[in-house]
Amino acid sequence: MLGRMESSSTPPGRHAAGLMAAAPHRDGNGSFLLAPVLVLNASYEPINVCAARRALVLVLKGVAMTEEENGHFLHAARIAMRVPSVIRLLEYRRIPHQSRALSRKNILLRDRNTCQYCAAVLPSAELTLDHVIPRSRGGSSTWENLVACCHPCNRRKGNQSPLEASMKLMREPRAFNLHTSRHIMRLMGRSDDKWRKYLFY
Ligand SMILES: [Zn+2]
């Protein structure tokens, strides 16, 4: 029956026509396929953020399931899929507690491009790294001793400790670990109410 229909009454371009009917939606899909999706571990613990496109692949592969949708549909071939806003891995993934590589870029990322003394938010090029305890005084180049700093503050502090310079750190510098990543996810989640219940726990 099906075979007859396809061979006789169905023009060869029928499937293509079906695809084209979905095309207007697909055009609109482009941007929200890049929308951030919160990735939860099987335990509901937030572990990452990825693009909707990647999240859909994980759901299609059966690696993750959709927990929240973002209100958009993906139309492709014969399927219409709801685009997720939050997905959850079906199998628990052990997250290594190792921290990220110590680099200028990651320190500025951790400190959100904010001078840790005067709170000025500046482009990366206008920030330097300050050794809280100066190198000349035995301070090491570690996550705990390096902070983002604007040039005026850096000059003012010179070879002194924050206490000697009467300059207070906004917060104690820590390694960029999962906690920091979660902090950034929290900040991103402010724009997406569906993330809130998973992030603000
Ligand atoms: Zn400053």
Image (tube, rainbow, N blue to C red):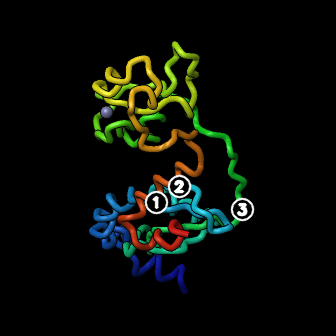
The N terminus is located in which quarter? bottom right
Q: CA distance from mark 2 to mark 1?
A: 6 Å
Label 2, residues with CA under 10 Å away: few <14, some 14-19, many ≥20: some
Which residue carries the number 2 mark?
A: 182
Identify the mark at residue 92; answer none if there is no mark: 3
Say whether residue 8 is left or right of residue 155. right
From the viewer's perspective, is the residue at label 2 or at label 3 nearer?
2
* Residue type, label 1: Arg
Mark 3 Cβ inside 8 Å of ligand 1: no
- Which label number is shown at residue 116? none
- Does any portion of residue 12 appear in the rendered image? no
- Closer to the camera, 36 or 72? 36
Q: Is residue 63 above or below residue 110?
A: below
The image position of residue 135, as x and y in percent, is 52, 16
Residue occupying image coordinates x 32% and y 20%: 155
Give the residue pinned by disc 1: 186
